Image (spheres, helix red, strand yellow):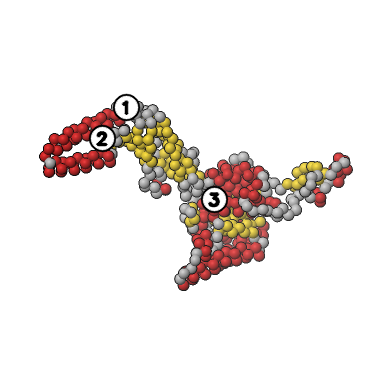
Amino acid sequence: MKFIKSLYLNNFFFYVLLGLIGMFVCAFIFPNLYNAVWFIVLILITFLGLDILLLYFARTGVEATRNTPEKLSNGDLNPISISIKNHYTFTISVKIIDEIPFQFQVRDFKIVKTIKASAEKEIGYDLRPTERGEYYFGNLNLYVSSPLKLISRRFTFDKDQMVPTYPSYIQLRKYDLLAFSNNLFQYGIKKIRRIGHTMEFEQIKEYVQGDDLRTLNWKATAKKNSLMVNQFQDEKSQSVYMAIDKGRVMQMPFDGLSLLDYAINSTLVLSNVILKKQDKAGIFAFSKKVENRVFAEKRSSQMQKILETLYNIKTDFFESDYSRLYVDIKKNINQRSLIILYTNFETMDGLNRQLPYLKGIAKNHLLVVVFFSNTELNEIINRKTNTIQEIYDKVIAEKFMFEKKLIANELKKYGIYSVLTQPENLTLDTINKYLEIKARGIL
């Protein structure tokens, strides 16, 4: 039974059969061909038996393993590799059909390779998940053919392998080393001018050209008989909370990911930068209620705690309750903190409904509202118009884009900082805003 289940006739076998049928038709017209055709049939049966012997004589014909990362990174290309070892003493042709998790909706996955006798080969492909959660791989199927190519023998490996998909830890690694220096400003293509300095003293050092003359330390200068200056650094151990709106407005998709997942990926990277800058990072999410809370701390285990919490954020995209958010912040965050709120406002009416709560939060904390520009509207605005309908569409799109800028100006009126960004630039823009706030010492 196992033998029957693993045996598959190749297309080449059916092409030969079609040729034989044609020859039998010709033999009906030319009877002298009849015996020759039967002789070819016997040759085909002989080669078929020989092909079966070649593939089934070896008990372990091939070995294969699927190598996946310990976890997948959401929204990024993740490398998957398949290692194949050929135990046959002849070159084989392998058709690989990997049963990819249903979330990818890939129904035509196939890789065909040739592997030399007693050789090993590694074959790779990439997967880009667009939602967090558990991804189950099915069977890794290998259909092996000998040089005769009449039949294939199926080998099955790595059944039911589960790999979780976490927020984008690949982005986390990308920005990790840059967090130690001001290279993040350059990487973000946004030069930040430092206005003054914060008052946390670091050290006294010798004056070099370019140092602020206002920081000269006259006592140290007299003692050393050379110009000495005080060096300051950004204040440390400040609390920074990232509040993620997981309501209806964050359901909008962009390049396969929802705005919520973009916010989650950005939160993970920004948390790492905050901790590298010796500040305390915390998160929470809200819709109908506030949950998924991690209090702001700077312990060594904080990043792991934040990662696991972000992974477990689930939502039904209900309408967000900003009054509950305001009450929760007032109750649970007593120290003045930087609160970076990831949300989205499409119209001024939408903002005005929530503005009283945002103003209430901004009274006791430094609030930064991060919201998204609609990139599809840019396409409509930049598209050449040929009809009256296209002109109407363009005018309406420009109105909505202008309203986004009005929202940013309205927030500014009440001392609320804002970041209007495109989803693909979210991480860089929020990091730059945090570093700007640190550089200006306004927290």
Q: Which residue is mark 2?
A: 4
Q: Which residue is mark 3?
A: 264
**Residue 295, how many percent across, how many down?**
61, 47
Decide: marks 3, 1 in contact (CB < 8 A)? no
Decide: marks 3, 2 in contact (CB < 8 A)? no
Taking the spot 19% from the left edge, 40% from the top edge, the residue there is 20
Of 387 and 351, the residue lying toward us: 387
Of 170 and 414, the residue lying toward us: 170
| Left or right: 27, with 192 as reference point | left
Q: Which residue is mark 1?
A: 58
Task: State the SS at label 1.
Answer: loop
Amino acid of disc 2: Ile
| Left or right: 416, with 104 as reference point | right
Is residue 60 at all visible to an observer of this figure? no
**Residue 26 placement: quadrant:** top left
Taking the spot 52% from the left edge, 54% from the top edge, the residue there is 260
Task: State the SS at label 2.
Answer: helix
Amino acid of disc 1: Ala
Going from N to C along the chain, the mark reached first, 3 or 1, is: 1
Taking the spot 63% from the left edge, 64% from the top edge, the residue there is 409
Task: State the SS at label 3.
Answer: helix
**Residue 242, how many percent across, how many down?**
59, 52
3 or 2: mark nearer the eye: 2
Amino acid of disc 3: Ile
Image quadrant occupied by the N terminus: top left
Q: Using the image, determine if residue 403 lies above or below residue 340.
A: below
3 or 1: mark nearer the eye: 1
| Count of marks placed on residues | 3
**Residue 75, how many percent across, how many down?**
50, 48
Distance in Å between CA atoms under marks 3 and 1? 51 Å
| Left or right: 252, with 226 as reference point | left
Going from N to C along the chain, the mark reached first, 3 or 2, is: 2
